[in-house]
Image (tube, grey):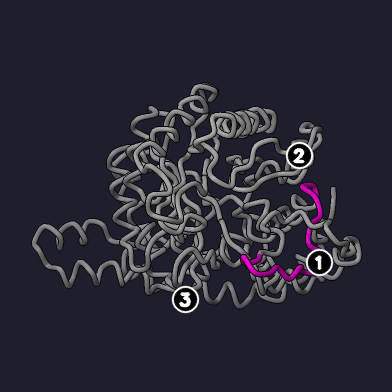
């Protein structure tokens, strides 16, 4: 079954931390009890949380200028699954894996699905790639893919997306994420309205190919590589296109794909209100499309996003759910460590949002008590729920401290020996 961390090593590491965890958990339980909150309810809440892993995130990222490969990075999709399995083994919060084609395309989908199942993993949304030219590709996407002036390039891009759907069906996925880099770098380069018309025409063909139980997720991105005008640049354009396409089209929110200081939580509320919130790519941003580790820059914003999700779930009940995935570029860290840390931070915001006293909050809102309404949110955000997260992991068979357990097991050193560096062999897919 691949290279999971040995159970005895994990149990040994947990044993050294369990007494401290029990003490911290008991202390937090007492504090929460005084607030009328049952810690066991929150722990069970944490245990059902999950966020999907990006297959490409298991490899070292990069920039437009360079990529510095890491030791033992995966060279193919099966080795990516090995790393994803370790992340889920330790965090117990990442059972889904999102594949990217053609980076992860293989002919034996049955073997890939069997390997994932053996690890307790499943395949989440699949992702298409028409923002790069691939070897042997007949028509270039240099001047656009789904929006290209060239009808042949558009047809090629549509065909690729439909192929992604077929691959996803074979793997048990139920959704396709479409992001395009199409746009313009100069005023006048494109007819802005005609570009969107071509996009919608292309997407209608993709939409028509969706199975009955599938959805297509439209991802918007403010800039790069189209620095003057990106065709799908904001949530408004994404929403309008999803409305035009039909009920199986939803909007995907990437936390990094907005201008600095954008009120992303309000975007989340608007899309949820009108039934078009499909899911998230979780990461963090300082300046623009940075793809930094989730919660590393603005954890309060992450909490506010989950506060809106908790509100939507309370309003709509079991019918409300989103497809959640991490989407990061790990340029200077061990990708496994960054993905584990990010999964924990997203789970943290999820649990903190459950701590919000919604009855009190609603009362303050209705009485126009702005300060106390804000303090109600801050009270939940400032609560350190780390013992809850650690207890949820331990009870589910994971690691009390995932990064420390990972280092204790020496996994990176082992895979570095099993995966010797070879020029051109990386399957990270970033650059």
User: For numbered disc 2, what is the local secondary structure?
Assistant: loop
Residue annotated with mark 2: 136
Q: Residue at x 67, y 54 (%)?
A: 56
Residue nearest the observer in this picture, 223 or 339: 223
Q: Is residue 350 visible?
A: no
**Position of residue 93 measured from the top left corner of the image (x, y, whole percent):** 59, 54
Is 107 part of what is drawn in magenta? no
The reply, left or right, for residue 229 in relation to residue 424 is left
Region rendered in magenta: 62-78
Dominant SS type (magenta): loop
**Residue at x 41%, y 42% (from the top left corner):** 251
Residue 311 in view of the camera = yes
Q: CA distance from mark 1 to mark 3?
A: 33 Å
Please tell me which residue is depicted at 78% across the width and 62% down the height of the picture: 73
Of 144 and 16, the residue lying toward us: 144
Snapshot quadrant of residue 101: top right
Q: Nearer the viewer, mark 3 or mark 2?
A: 2
* Pointer 3 or 2: first along the chain: 3
Residue 398 spot, x, y in % from top left: 67, 60
Q: Residues within 10 Å of mark 3 (few under 14, many from 20)?
A: few
Closest to the camera, between mark 1 and mark 2, is 2
Q: Position of residue 293 (x, y in %)?
A: 55, 67
Identify whether 228 is placed above or below 292. above
Q: Find the distance from the CA under tag 1 to the CA under tag 2.
A: 37 Å
Report the label total: 3
**x then y, percent, for residue 380:** 34, 68
Q: Quadrant of residue 363?
A: bottom left
Kindly identify which residue carries mark 1.
Answer: 411
Q: Quadrant of residue 112?
A: top right
Q: Which mark sits nearer the N-terminus, 1 or 3? A: 3
- Residues at marks 3 and 2, CA–CA distance in whole angstroms: 61 Å
Which residue is identified by label 3? 27
């Amino acid at each position: 079954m691949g290279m999971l961390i040995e159970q005895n090593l994990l149990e040994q590491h947990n044993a050294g931390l369990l007494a401290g965890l029990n003490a911290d958990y008991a202390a937090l339980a007492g504090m929460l009890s005084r607030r009328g909150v049952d810690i066991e309810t929150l722990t069970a809440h944490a245990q059902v949380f999950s966020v999907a892993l990006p297959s490409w995130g298991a490899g070292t990222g990069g920039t437009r200028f360079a990529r510095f490969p890491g030791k033992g990075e995966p060279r193919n999709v099966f080795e990516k699954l090995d790393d994803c399995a370790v992340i889920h083994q330790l965090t117990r919060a990442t059972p889904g894996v999102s594949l990217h084609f053609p980076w992860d395309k293989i002919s034996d989908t049955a073997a890939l699905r069997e390997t994932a199942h053996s690890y307790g993993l499943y395949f989440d949304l699949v992702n298409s790639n028409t923002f790069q030219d691939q070897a042997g590709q007949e028509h270039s996407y240099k001047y656009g893919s789904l929006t290209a002036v060239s009808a042949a390039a558009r047809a090629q891009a549509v065909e690729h997306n439909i192929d992604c759907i077929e691959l996803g069906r074979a793997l048990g996925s139920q959704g396709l994420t479409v992001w395009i880099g199409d746009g313009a770098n100069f005023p006048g380069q494109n007819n802005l309205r005609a570009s969107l018309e071509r996009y919608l025409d292309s997407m209608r063909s993709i939409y028509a190919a969706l199975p009955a139980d599938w959805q297509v997720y439209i991802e918007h991105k403010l800039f790069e590589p189209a620095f003057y005008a990106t065709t799908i640049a904001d949530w408004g354009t994404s929403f309008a296109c999803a409305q035009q396409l039909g009920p199986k089209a939803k909007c995907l929110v990437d936390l990094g794909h907005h201008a600095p200081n954008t009120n992303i939580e309000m975007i989340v509320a608007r899309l949820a209100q009108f039934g078009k919130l499909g899911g998230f790519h979780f990461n963090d941003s300082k300046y623009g499309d940075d793809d930094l580790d989730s919660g590393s820059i603005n954890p309060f914003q992450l909490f506010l996003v989950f506060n809106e999700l908790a509100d939507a779930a309370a309003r709509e009940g079991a019918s409300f759910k989103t497809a959640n995935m991490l989407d990061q570029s790990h340029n200077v860290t061990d990708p496994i460590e960054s993905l584990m840390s990010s999964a924990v931070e997203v789970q943290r915001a999820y649990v903190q949002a459950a701590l919000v006293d919604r009855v009190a909050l609603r009362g303050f809102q209705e009485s126009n008590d702005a300060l106390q309404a804000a303090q109600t949110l801050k009270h939940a955000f400032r609560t350190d729920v780390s013992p809850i997260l650690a207890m949820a992991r331990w009870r589910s068979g994971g690691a009390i401290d995932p990064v420390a357990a990972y280092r204790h097991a020496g996994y990176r050193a082992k895979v570095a020996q099993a995966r010797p560096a070879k020029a051109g062999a990386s399957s990270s897919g970033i650059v």
